[in-house]
């Protein structure tokens, strides 16, 4: 802010002096004015940023500091030579502006920072959790439409509360969720901590319940009767000597058709009453002062009555608004609970369907394994039969070879080769039929 005004040529330096009501308010009578002037002199050519400025509306010393600021910034030594920023919440700043009629004209520029809407809160909430290390937030970044809608509804409830603090409270929610995850996480597991939907909803429910209770307590503590200042006695009537006892003739007052209103009585009444005979000037003057004091007292009393009636009406209106707001909040809570119940029922249905699908896939896998097992057993049985047949053939062949060697047909001792209908020696000269060997 200081750099902006410096670049625009309004200030001699870009420095910003940050202060609070404590730096302006004195500790004893006569201390506040010089302290405020000293701080204003220090801020000449700079930006004076007063944080939580609404505290300047609380207490006599704080009001004195605010009056001193109003007085100083109109003087040539301070006018147009510094920038003063009063920061605070809208309602508190409006209350501060109302304590001095000159504040609004001396602080004409208003910059209002609107609160985050639910979508912006959810975006910031996601961004803050993304910055956490070793955290899996797929449940948030790839959330279902129903769960996103539920989170937005939670943020809608929170942003409607008067004690919602926007980004600060979003950061509090993110820290709360991450803290719960750290408490339940397995420290020995190398896998990232998985963010669950239930953890987020629990954190939201805790904050909604806490903030709603605080709002109800604040409404319950609102004052019912306003406080009125004590009427001070007129110093001119204190310790006044009694009027002189003059034995004179009394003058009758003129007849009246109707009683005048108390607030209409005053100087006109004092001048309308005729002066009795023999009343001294001193007694008459004191009587006129007493009449004026009585009229002023009556006028102030009726003003107090009117102000009391106004404040009571305002309090009743505010109380009705607060009750309506609480009813709306209760309706939102009930709607939120209903939607949460629907979401839980839908989640249960989804899990049941998922479980049935898992059972079906498991049964299919079992049938496949059973089919493969039967095929392997059939193949082993076939191979076993072939082995027995092959062993039988080899046994017969060995018997035939022994018998051929016994016959001695081939004197050269060649090996006999099986042919159709018999055997022939490897040299080709001799042949023995199966019938000769007794194999036919």
Image (cartoon, grey):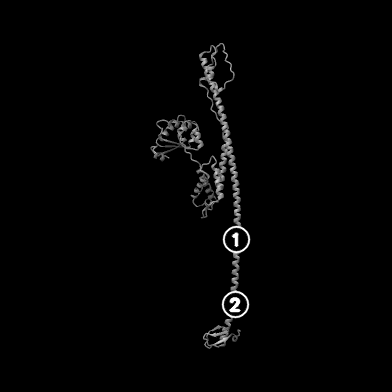
* Circle 2: element type: helix
Q: Residue at x 51, y 14 (%)?
A: 281
Residue 26 visible to an observer of this rendering: no
Residue 355 visible to an observer of this rendering: yes
Question: Which quarter of the rendering shows the C terminus?
Answer: bottom right
> In this view of the protein, which residue sits in the foreground, 123 or 56?
123
> In this view of the protein, which residue sits in the foreground, 66 or 93?
93
- Callout 1 environment at 10 Å: few (<14), some (14 to 19), or many (20+)? few
Question: Which quarter of the rendering shows the N terminus?
Answer: top left
List x then y, in percent, for residue 325.
Answer: 57, 39
Residue ID for mark 1: 362
Looking at the rendered structure, which numbered label has been put on residue 97? none
Q: Residue furthest front?
A: 257
List x then y, in percent, for residue 300.
Answer: 54, 25
Q: Does label 1 or label 2 sit earlier along the sequence? A: 1
Side of 83 relative to 230 (left or right): left
List x then y, in percent, for residue 311.
Answer: 56, 31
Q: Residue at x 60, y 66 (%)?
A: 371
List x then y, in percent, for residue 164.
Answer: 53, 41
**Looking at the image, residue 396 lies above or below residue 100:** below
**Looking at the image, residue 223 lies above or below residue 120:** above
Residue ID for mark 2: 389
């Amino acid at each position: 802010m200081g750099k902006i005004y410096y670049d625009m040529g309004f200030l001699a330096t870009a420095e910003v002096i940050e202060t609070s009501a404590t730096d302006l308010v004195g500790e004893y009578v006569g201390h506040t004015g010089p302290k405020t002037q000293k701080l204003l002199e220090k801020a000449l050519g700079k930006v004076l940023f007063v944080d939580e400025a609404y505290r300047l509306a609380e207490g006599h010393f704080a009001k004195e500091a605010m009056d001193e600021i109003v007085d100083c910034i109109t003087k040539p030594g301070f006018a147009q030579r510094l920038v003063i920023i009063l920061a605070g919440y809208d309602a508190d700043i409006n209350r501060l502006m109302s304590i001095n009629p000159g504040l609004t004209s001396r602080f004409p520029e208003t910059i209002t920072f609107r609160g985050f809407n639910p979508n912006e809160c959810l975006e910031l909430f996601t961004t803050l959790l993304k910055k956490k290390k070793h955290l899996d937030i797929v449940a948030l970044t790839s959330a279902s439409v129903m769960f996103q809608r539920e989170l937005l509804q939670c943020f809608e409830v929170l942003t409607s509360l008067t004690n919602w603090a926007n980004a600060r409270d979003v950061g509090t929610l993110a820290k709360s969720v991450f803290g719960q995850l750290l408490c339940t996480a397995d420290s020995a597991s190398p896998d990232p901590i998985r963010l669950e939907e239930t953890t987020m909803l629990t954190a939201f429910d805790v904050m909604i319940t806490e903030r709603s209770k605080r709002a109800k307590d604040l409404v319950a503590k609102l004052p019912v009767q306003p406080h009125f200042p004590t009427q001070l006695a007129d110093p001119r009537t204190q310790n006044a000597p009694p009027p002189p006892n003059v034995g004179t003739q009394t003058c009758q007052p003129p007849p009246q058709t109707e009683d005048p209103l108390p607030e209409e009585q005053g100087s006109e009444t004092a001048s309308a009453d005729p002066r009795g005979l023999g009343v001294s000037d001193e007694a008459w003057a004191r009587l006129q002062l007493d009449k004026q004091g009585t009229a002023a007292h009556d006028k102030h009393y009726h003003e107090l009555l009117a102000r009391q009636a106004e404040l009571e009406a305002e309090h009743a209106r505010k109380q009705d608004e607060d009750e309506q707001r609480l009813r709306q909040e209760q309706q939102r809570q009930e709607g939120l609970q209903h939607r949460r119940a629907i979401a839980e029922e839908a989640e249960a249905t989804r899990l049941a369907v998922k479980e049935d699908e898992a059972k079906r896939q498991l049964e299919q896998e079992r049938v496949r394994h059973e089919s493969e097992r039967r095929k392997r057993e059939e193949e082993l049985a076939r191979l076993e039969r072939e082995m027995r047949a092959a062993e039988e053939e080899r046994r017969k062949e060995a018997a035939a070879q022994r018998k051929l060697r016994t016959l001695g047909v081939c004197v050269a001792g060649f090996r006999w080769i099986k042919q159709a209908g018999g055997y022939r020696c490897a040299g080709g000269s001799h042949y023995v039929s199966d019938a000769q060997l007794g194999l036919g």
